[in-house]
Amino acid sequence: MVHNPFDLSGKVAIVTGASRGLGQYFGRALAKAGADLVITSRNIDALQDFKAEIEALGRKAFPVALDVRDYDSIQRMVTLTIEAYDKIDILINNAGCNIRKPALEITWEDWNTVLDTNLRGSFFVAQGVAREMIPRKYGRIINIGSVTSVFGYAGITPYCASRGGVKQMTMSLADDWGIYGLTVNCLAPGWFKTDQNKILYEDREWVTYICDRIPLKRPGEPGDLEGTVVFLASDASAYLTGQTILVDGGISTGATRATSKKPQ
């Protein structure tokens, strides 16, 4: 029988922030590849429809309430996962938030909300999961970044700072935990429509502008992330660690067009 290095059958994957958007894209892709899931959200009731969807694919889905800004909540999530499955193979470290304001209007509380969620929360979720992976000498940790891990955009300074930090954190953890057989990588999506940014897509001029800057000439679709997340979660990426992979249609090339004009 030919070994399929992309097969996730028998693997257990945690997907944080799975009540909507990218978290659900990632969860579906892993389930289709054979993984059973732990799905998390601050509101566990918001996970019930997605749980049913994953179970309809023939996989298990265990909902757990998780607030990544609460250390005890993180530890409880890890404990419940081990009680349910006895192991953790994969972490999709996806939970995040954004606050859109001009830099001069950002408050102390705004900064803390975004950084505590996207950066501090991601670190302590990874730490809690790694403590369970290390004794087994196996683990795939996938931190979710953004094109803002390498680019900066006006109006979302805390978000850009947090995503840049996730990229650097990924490299540090890869170096720290590689000796134990863990890989740590960052998947950085470009422009995908989510609940966080859907207001932007209501502006047709903005959509035209952003598509003109993307060499593939369109925003991302859910299926555009499936191959990369399965690759990073699977044995196919066993010798890949510390890397940031941009799934962005090429916008990170810095491409511009002579006809481009940013809307005011």
Image (cartoon, rainbow, N blue to C red):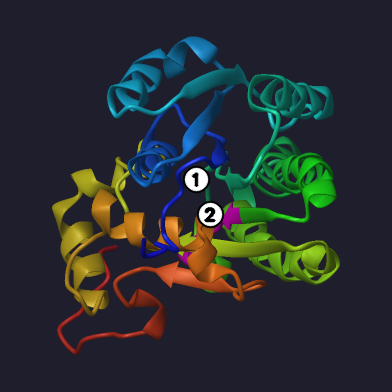
Q: Secondary structure at mark 1?
A: loop
Residue occupying image coordinates x 73% and y 40%? 125
Q: Foreground: 41 or 219?
A: 41
Residue lying at the far front of the rendered structure: 1
**79 relative to 184, above or below:** above
Quadrant for the N terminus in the image? bottom left
The reply to whether callout 1 and callout 2 are in contact (CB within 8 Å) is: yes
Give percent across and percent down for residue 13: 55, 39
Write down the residue under mark 2: 156
Q: Secondary structure at mark 2?
A: loop
Give percent across and percent down for residue 77: 71, 25
The segment highlighted magenta reads 142-147
Residue occupying image coordinates x 35% and y 57%? 225
Marker disc for residue 100: 1
Label 1, residues with CA under 10 Å away: few <14, some 14-19, many ≥20: some
User: Is residue 230 shown left or right of residue 219?
Assistant: right
Give percent across and percent down for residue 10: 51, 40
Marker disc for residue 250: none
Amino acid type of the residue that numbered disc 1 sits on in the rendered structure = Arg
Q: Foreground: 206 or 63?
A: 63
Asked if one can make out residue 97 in the rendered structure from this viewpoint, the answer is no
**60 relative to 205, above or below:** above
Q: Quadrant of residue 224?
A: bottom left
Residue occupying image coordinates x 84% and y 68%? 179
224 in magenta:
no
Mark nearer the N terminus (1 vs 2): 1
User: Is residue 15 shown left or right of residue 251?
Assistant: right
